Amino acid sequence: MEEMRILLKYADQINPESAQDYIKVGGYKGLEKARLMEKKALIEEVKKSGLRGRGGAGFNAGMKWSFVPQDAPVKYVVCNLDEGEPGTYKDRIICEKNAHALLEGMAICGAAIGSDQGYIYCRGEYPFIVKLLKNAVQSAKQAGALGNFDIEVRMGAGAYVCGEETALIESIEGHRGEPRFKPPFPGVAGLWGVPTVVNNVETFACLPYILTNGAQWFATIGAAKYPGTKVVTLTGDIVNATYFEVPTNMTLRDVIFKLGGGIKNGKKFKAVQVGGTSGAFIPEENLDTPIDFDSMGTIGAALGSGAVLVLDETRDIVDTVARITKFFEHESCGKCNPCREGTFRMREMVQKVNEGKGTERDLESILLLARVMRRASLCGLGQAAPIPVESTIKHFKYEYMRKLI
Ligand SMILES: Cc1cc2nc3c(=O)[nH]c(=O)nc-3n(C[C@H](O)[C@H](O)[C@H](O)COP(=O)(O)O)c2cc1C
Ligand code: SF4
């Protein structure tokens, strides 16, 4: 199976800031079509395409839009470009190669829910992308491509939790980036308390192609229940440490060995962590799983952001996980107990095992704490933080055992 470029088809062939360049390759045609449709019909079209969120939760995009009350006087469209997940840079690549697809997608969403204001929340570490996007918005306005839809670019300050949609909203409002209790969901009460759709960059960027080519066309690409393509970013001990846009039914093995060129320096494969730092570690025997959202779920993993971190045979799994637990301890916002205290204790216990001072009792305590954090944490950060630990104790227990006292 080969790469399939839709979002990245004209990568490096057009100037990403120029609306005129984008228009020359068929850009803004989807928005024109969307504007001629009834709002309900437009939402139905997106539902029919089967497009599901590319930011991690995999929620049906059209369904999410349908929850927005049509009669609300003010509504917002928010793009999540926080991209704080280590090893993930797909949203940056989409902006660098095809920024106007994102702007067009946001305007299509605006047409569907009846909003004339969009915000892009960009991670603090991407100042060059903020500049690129501001220039792209300016260029789209000059070309009259966005009509009455306006887009503002806001910059985060570099907190991982601000990728969580309600923390992101708090941050745009100028507050400390902490997740809100849900419900109400943003679709009903989001930015400044009004109905707000939050979608990922890649989700928005799919929309122009769905509108131009039809929902049916999109629905038949890749996996039936998670159709379309996915931009994956390969890092770690892999020959081609770069990005690829692949149909969602491609297997992990093909991503790593065909596109990625296999393991660097002739070494053997040990594990792959999919979906970023909060993802599960997957052993060799599960590599024939397609990368779509549901298939990954069947092996206890998650597609997440689409980051693919490959580890070769020489890597120390417990040491890798110990570093991950430090990351979560640092990034926990502290709002809820199970995560604030849990990420601290988890780091402490995994570190103890890694330093050769742990016992089997510590492993039991780690698993117990993991269960509590998954069930009792307020947001996805605390709920997902134990996944790397649990998945490695499941698949690579011998690495922990050999470090115990
Ligand atoms: C800790 C945490 C970090 C997140 N980071 C991101 C992110 O960087 N980008 C993103 O699109 N979604 C992120 N999400 C998911 C968002 O909360 C939300 O589900 C997503 O933006 C919705 O867009 P989608 O439906 O298009 O995927 C994160 C969630 C959590 C809990
Ligand atoms: S789970 Fe962690 S990051 Fe999320 S609200 Fe609780 S303390 Fe904050």
Image (spheres, rainbow, N blue to C red):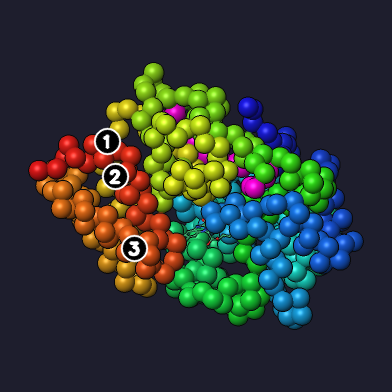
Disc number for residue 169: none
Looking at the rendering, the stretch of residues picked out in magenta corresponds to 225-238
Q: What residue is rendered at 85% in x and 50% in y?
A: 29
Real-space CA distance between mark 2 and mark 1, rounded to the nearest whole angstrom: 13 Å
Q: Which mark lies nearer to you, 1 or 3?
A: 3
Task: From the top left corner, tell me how far across and down residue 164 is, in percent.
Answer: 50, 63
Q: Quadrant of the N terminus?
A: top right
Real-space CA distance between mark 1 and mark 3, rounded to the nearest whole angstrom: 25 Å
Q: Which of marks 3 and 2 is nearer the N terminus?
A: 3
Q: What residue is rendered at 62% in x and 40% in y?
A: 248
Residue 257 appears in the figure: yes
Reading the image, the residue beneath label 1 is 316
Q: Which amino acid, by three-letter code, is at mark 3? A: Met
- Left or right: residue 263 compared with residue 24: left
Q: Does the residue labelled 2 lie within 8 Å of ligand 2?
A: no
Q: How many other residues sit within 10 Å of disc 3, few (<14), some (14-19) or many (≥20)?
A: many
Q: Which mark lies nearer to you, 2 or 1?
A: 2
